[in-house]
Amino acid sequence: MWKDVVNKGLRSVTGYELNKARPATARPAGGGQRAPKKRPQAEPKPAAPEKVQRERPIPGHYDDDAKKIMHAVRPRTMTGWQSRIGRILGG
């Protein structure tokens, strides 16, 4: 049969062969399920102090109009000065 040919090839190349799967063993009467373990209630962790993110000052060589725009958009973006000046001058 074709299985013999395939197994012969597998044995010669890899040393393995295909076999029919063995039937599963019988499970215990209770279905084999365990009762869930109860974990003790952990105390809630205190809130971490809010981190203050300090940003470097705007470089002095940027023109005054660009500085005004950067100060206006500061709380609404997460980009650095280099990205902001590129967008301001390029736009």
Image (cartoon, rainbow, N blue to C red):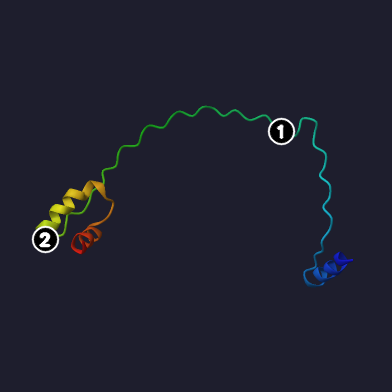
Does dot 1 land on a helix, a strand or a loop? loop
- The kind of residue tagged 2 is Asp
Query: Residue 45 sits in which quadrant?
Result: top left
Is residue 82 left or right of 39 when viewed as pictured? Answer: left
- Spatial separation of the CA atoms under disc 1 and disc 2: 71 Å
Q: Position of residue 58 (x, y in %)?
A: 16, 56
Q: Residue at x 23, y 60 (%)?
A: 87
Does dot 2 land on a helix, a strand or a loop? loop
Is residue 54 left or right of 2 when viewed as pictured? Answer: left
Q: Which residue is mark 1?
A: 33
Residue 68 or 37: which is nearer the viewer?
68
First-in-chain label (1 vs 2):
1
Q: Which residue is mark 2?
A: 63
- The kind of residue tagged 1 is Gln
Q: Position of residue 72 (x, y in %)?
A: 17, 49
Q: Residues within 10 Å of mark 1 (few under 14, many from 20)?
A: few
Q: Position of residue 23 (x, y in %)?
A: 84, 47
Q: Residues within 10 Å of mark 2 (few under 14, many from 20)?
A: few
Residue furthest toward the front?
91
Q: Position of residue 32 (x, y in %)?
A: 75, 34
Is residue 79 left or right of 46 when viewed as pictured? Answer: left
Residue furthest toward the right?
1
